[in-house]
Amino acid sequence: MIPTEDASARKRKIEEKLKQEQETLSFIRENLEKSDQLTKGMVSILSSFESRLMQLENSIIPVHKQTENLQRLQENVDKTLSCMDHVISYYHVAKDTDRIIREGPTGRLDEYLACIAKIQKAVEYFQDNNPDSPELNTVKARFEKGKELLEAEFRSLLTRYSKPVPPILILDAISVDEELEVQEEVVLEHLPEAVLQDIICIAGWLVEYGRNQDFMNVYFQIRSNQLDRSIKGLKDHFRKNSASSGILYSPAVQTKRKDTPTKKAPKRPVYIPADLDLRVKHHSEALNEKHGAPTGKDDVLDIEIDSYIHCISAFVKLAQSEYALLTEIIPEHHQKKTFDSLIQEALDNLMLEGDNIVSAARRAIMRHDYSAVLTIFPILRHLKMNKSEFDATLQGTAASTKNKLPTLITSMETIGAKALEEFADSIKNDPDKEYNMPKDGTVHELTSNAILFLQQLLDFHETAGAMLASQVLGDTYNIPLDPRETSSASSYTSDFNKRLLSAYICKVLGNLQLNLLSKSKVYEDSALSAIFLHNNYNYILKSLEKSELIQLVTVTQKRAETSYRELIEQQIDTYQRSWLKVTEHLTDRNMPVFQPGTKLKDKERQVIKDKFKGFNDGLEELCKIQKGWAIPDKEQRDFIRQAQKKIVSDAYRAFLHRCANISFTKNPEKYHKYRPEEVEEMIEKLFDTSA
C-alpha cells in the first residue's frame, strides 16, 4: 500500500504538469488562429494583385504590339534607304574613281586596287540587276582601263627593276672555296623586296579578277632577256678581262671535296647595287694587273673554253634563281610552262655555242688537227659532272628542252671518239718523208706530238674513257665486257672505261712504234737508225713514267715498261755493232805469229800497218759522223759513251800491248796516232753538236 502523503504529492505534480500542458495548448491555438488570419489576409492581397496584373496586361499588350509594328516599319524604312544609297553609289562609281584610274597605280597600288574592286562590284550589280543600262558599259570600260593600267604597271616594274646579274656576282654564286668546310650559298635577289611584293600583288589580281594570262608572257619575255643578258655579260667579262692563267673562279678545276660536310650552308642574299659596274671594272683591272692580258691564240682559246664552262654553271645557277622568283609570281599550274619559255633563249644560245665548238672540232679533224679536239674534253667533263643538277633544274619542262643537253653531250662524245680513232690511225699512217726526218736522229715530231696528245688526254681520262665507251668501241680493242659492268647499253663502269682508254693508248703507242720502225728505214746508216729508234723509245718511256701514263698503260699491258726497256737495249746493241768496223782491226785475226826478236816479213809488217790504219781511219770517220748525232737524254748519252769507251779502249789497249815489242815500221808515230786516253776523249765527244 502506497502511503497517503506520497500519493498526494504525486497528484499535485501531475496536476501542475497538466496545467502547464493546457497553457501550452492554449498558446498554440492562439497562434494557429493568428496564422489563419494572416493567411486569409495574404490570400486576399494576392487575389487582389492578380486581378490588377490581369487588368495591366490587358492594357499593355496591345500597346506593345503596336510599338513592335512601328519598330519593324522603321527598320524597313532604314533598310530601304540604305539599299537606295548603295544602289545610287553604283551610279557614282565611275565618277568617283575616274581620277585615280586615270592617274594609274604607280606609287599607290593598294588605293588603286580598292578602286578597281569598287568598279568590279558595280559591274556585277548592273549585270545582275540592270544589264541594259548604259551605266554597265561605262563601268565595264572603266574596269578594262584599270586592268590595262595594272598590266602596264606590271610590265613597267619588271622592265625598270630587272637588271642583268653582274659577272662578279655570278662568279661569287658559282665559285667553290675548298678551304671552307661549309659553303656559303649566295642567293641572287633580282628585285627589291617592295617592288617584288607589288608585282606579286598585281599578278595575283590579274589571275583572280583580271582573267588574263598575258602578263605571264610579259614576265617570261622580260626575265628571259635578262637571263640571256646576264650570261652574255659574263662571257664578255671573260673575253675582256680574264688572264691567260685563268680566273680565280673555275668550276672546271674547283670541285667540292668528298669530305665536304652536308650541312646546309647559310644563304646570303645578294642584291645588285648601283655601283657594281665600277666594282666589276676594278676587279677586272686587278686581274689584268696580276696576270697580264692574254694575247696568244692558245690563251684566247683557253679563255673561250673557260668562259663557256662558266656560262654553263652560270645558266644552272641563274635558272634556279629565276625559278625561285617565278614561283612567287606565276600561278602554280603555269610555272613549269612559263619557266620553260623563260630559259629557252639563253639555253638555245648555250647549245648553239656548244654546237659551234663541235663543228670547229669537226673541221679541225678534217684538217687532221687532232689536238684541237682536246678543247671538247674540259667542256664535256663539266657538262657530265653538272648533268644531274642541270636535269633537276629543267625538271618539268618540255621533253625538247630537257633533251638539249644530252644531245650536245652525245655530239661531243661522238666527235671526240671519232677524233681519237682518226688520231690513232694518223699515227699509224704518217708518211715516211725523208726531208721530215731529224738529221741527228733525235726524237721525231710525230713522237713528241703523240705523247703530248696522250698526256693531255690523261687529264681527262675518265671523260675520254666514257667517250670511247659511249661509241661501244670495246670490241675494237678486244676489251671483254662483264655483264655486271653495265646497267644499260651506254652506261659502263669506271673500271671498264679505264681499261678501254688503256687499250686505246696502247693502240696509239703500238701504231707509233710501227711507224717509227718504218721511218727509221729512211736512214741509210743503220747506226743512225738505231740512235733514232733509241731516242724515240727512250722519250716514250720517260714520258710515260713522268706523266703517270705508264700506270694507265699497264692496266692492259703489264709488260709495257719492260718491253720498252728491251727495245732500248736492242737499239743500243745495234748501235754498238756499228763500231765493229773499227774494233775488228784490233782483233787477232790475220795477226802474224812471231817470236820475240824475230824480224817480221814485209807482208806481216803490212798487216800490222793496215790494222793501225784501219782503226785510225774508222775511228776518225765514226767520230766525225757521230759527233753530229744527238741523244737528248743525258743519262742515256753518258751510258752509251761510257759503254763504247770501255769496249773500244779495252780492245785498243790490248792491241797496243800485243804490238808493243814489234818493230813493224820506222815511223811508228805515223800509225800509232792516238793514245788510249785520246781515243776515250774522242768518244766522249760523240753526240755533242757543240764539240
Image (spheres, rainbow, N blue to C red):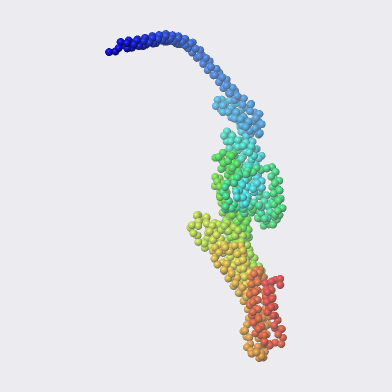
Q: Position of residue 421 (x, y in %)?
A: 57, 61
Q: In front: 355, or 312?
A: 312
Whether residue 350 can be seen here: no
The furthest residue to the left: 1
The residue lying at 50 percent from left, 54 percent from top is: 488
Q: Position of residue 273 (x, y in %)?
A: 68, 42
Whether residue 193 can be seen here: yes
The residue lying at 54 percent from left, 40 percent from top is: 333
Q: Quadrant of the N terminus?
A: top left
Question: Number of numbered discs present?
Answer: 0
Q: Is residue 134 above or below residue 106?
A: above
Q: Position of residue 682 (x, y in %)?
A: 69, 76
**91 horizontally vs 690: left or right:** left
Q: Where on the picture, by quarter, is residue 46?
A: top left
Q: In front: 63, or 326?
A: 63
Q: Is residue 370 above or below residue 324?
A: below
Q: Is residue 346 above or below residue 531?
A: above
Q: Quadrant of the C terminus?
A: bottom right
Q: Where on the picture, by quarter, is residue 502?
A: bottom right
Q: Is residue 590 above or below residue 197?
A: below
Q: Position of residue 573 (x, y in %)?
A: 60, 74
